[in-house]
Amino acid sequence: MSCLLGIDLGTSSVKIVILTLEGTVRGVTTVGYPVDIPQTGYAEQDPEHWWQAIAEGMGQTLVKASHPSILGIGFSGQMHGTVLLDQNGEPLRPAIIWADQRSSELLPEIESLVGRQVLAETCGTAPAAGFQISTLYWLSCFEPETLARTVTVLSPKDYVRYRMTGEVGSDDSDAAGTGIFDVGTRQWAKEVIRRLKLPERIFPTVYPSAQVVGHLQKKAAEALRLPAGIPVSAGCADQPAQAVANGLIDPPIGSVTIGTGGQVFLPLAKPMFDSGLRLHTFCHAAESRWYLMGAMLSAGMSFRWLRGILGGDRISYLEMDKLAATVPPGCDGLVFLPYLIGERSPLMDSNTRGGFVGLTLGHGPGHFVRAVLEGVAFSLRQIIELMTNCGAEVTEFVASGTGLANPLWRQILADVLGRSLAQGVDAHAKERAGMGAAMIAGIGTRHYSGYADVAALAPKFTLVTEPTQSAAAVYHRLYPEFVRLYPQLRTSFKNLGNLGQG
């Protein structure tokens, strides 16, 4: 049987998906790897860990799929991160990923040097901590010798593709996520690069996501247990990839995703910008499409953090759900602020901190669990309201990601939004990004005629979670209190952060 291969390089794991041309998943494997925290606020990964995880998972996936013939390879990847290669094509240092906050104090300086209007209308985004634009500027200030030795800068999934093909490059969607890309012309923003005094020579060639940019080399093929010569497409960022698999190429249907972070995704027929720089306008995988995105940092991460607090491996996520289900909507007045590593949309504040507000002696473990689920849902509602206030149109949301495969969390989000959430009835909702990566490879190898052809393979979203009227009414009253908490605590969060460093 002939199939397509999709590699989804996430923050905490890689998912390897083998997909038939008819859109059926034949095999999927997940292999994890660590996020290194060398000091508070830092988040790094060893690119070799990505490669080892892919090599490990590839063999397992091929066995599950009965060793099909692979027609093409595509990629999906965590966005914004930075991999620096030297003259020998080796990483100069660990990758600095999207969750890294070391550049946060430099953000006002970057905005001043570039200008807010240029950032909004050219790059489509503010220079958030963890974005490649901010990381590169930090390196120019604090590790100039590393930057001087850099020959090429890549996003995470582009490094994996380089290991497979020996060809360096990026794609429109991942390049847009760096914050240093002209999303209208789909070229590196050279004037921004000059204003920040970054070396223009290090930025790679950018390709359309589906374009075949190389072929699997012999050494990589041996490590991956694949035949050499398989065509490899450029791939795309994880959000466009899941959108492709869900058929979300054109407005007005969007998606809400809860993974490590949380994202709201709305396709656009033309660029739409938030003048307040609280949202991101990026390039879609399809060449004539864009998307509006709001991203919160600690969605599933908050749930995983709480599990560690409650006992780690001694308590399962299912047991946590059961605890939360015993608590009424609104958690008897307990509110969670999910800002464990600062926040992006809609706050754009790396100094903010998380917290439980409204604690009493009557609150127990179940309240804490449910408050986390509700707090993430409130943050996602803020992002959606900001999008609609900017003029975006959305008629329906598709629920995506591991977090929203959880029925309780999906119901809470529907209740908080007061909107229905749709899902496909298939068993692979958690593999959408990897499926999208494989489909994009199919476009590049001409097994599909284009994105409209692929959209026909999208699932039928017949599994609908409707809001519960009584719970929605509670959340409607509680939501304004959630929104008011951050402005009231913003100064205290910054002061506490400074005290913690001193």
Image (cartoon, helix red, strand yellow):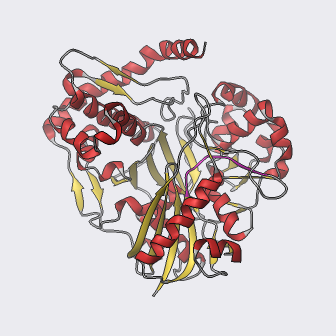
Q: Which residues are magenta?
A: 77-85
Q: Can the viewer see residue 171 in this picture?
A: no
Give the percent coordinates (x, y) of residue 262. Answer: 43, 43
Number of marks in the image? 0
User: Between 53 and 376, which is closer to the camera in this rendering?
Assistant: 53
Q: Which quadrant is the N terminus positioned in?
A: bottom left
Give the percent coordinates (x, y) of residue 347. Answer: 49, 29
Is 22 on the left-hand or right-hand side of 269? left
Residue at image coords 63%, 49%: 46
Is 317 on the left-hand or right-hand side of 280? left
User: Between 396 and 215, which is closer to the camera in this rendering?
Assistant: 215
Residue at image coords 62%, 71%: 223
The quadrant in which residue 172 appears is bottom right
Is 271 on the left-hand or right-hand side of 324? right
Q: Is residue 161 magenta?
A: no
Q: Can the viewer see residue 145 in this picture?
A: yes
Give the percent coordinates (x, y) of residue 346. Answer: 47, 33
Q: Is residue 82 magenta?
A: yes
The quadrant in which residue 117 appears is top right
Look at the picture and state if 367 lies above or below 152: above
Give the percent coordinates (x, y) of residue 38. Answer: 62, 34
Q: Name the residue at the bottom extreme.
A: 1
Is 110 on the left-hand or right-hand side of 446? right
Look at the picture and state if 112 lies above or below 180: above
Q: Name the residue at the front extreme.
A: 314
Q: Which quadrant is the C terminus positioned in?
A: top right
Look at the picture and state if 229 lies above or below 298: below
User: Between 30 and 128, which is closer to the camera in this rendering?
Assistant: 30
Look at the picture and state if 426 lies above or below 228: above
Residue at image coords 50%, 72%: 59
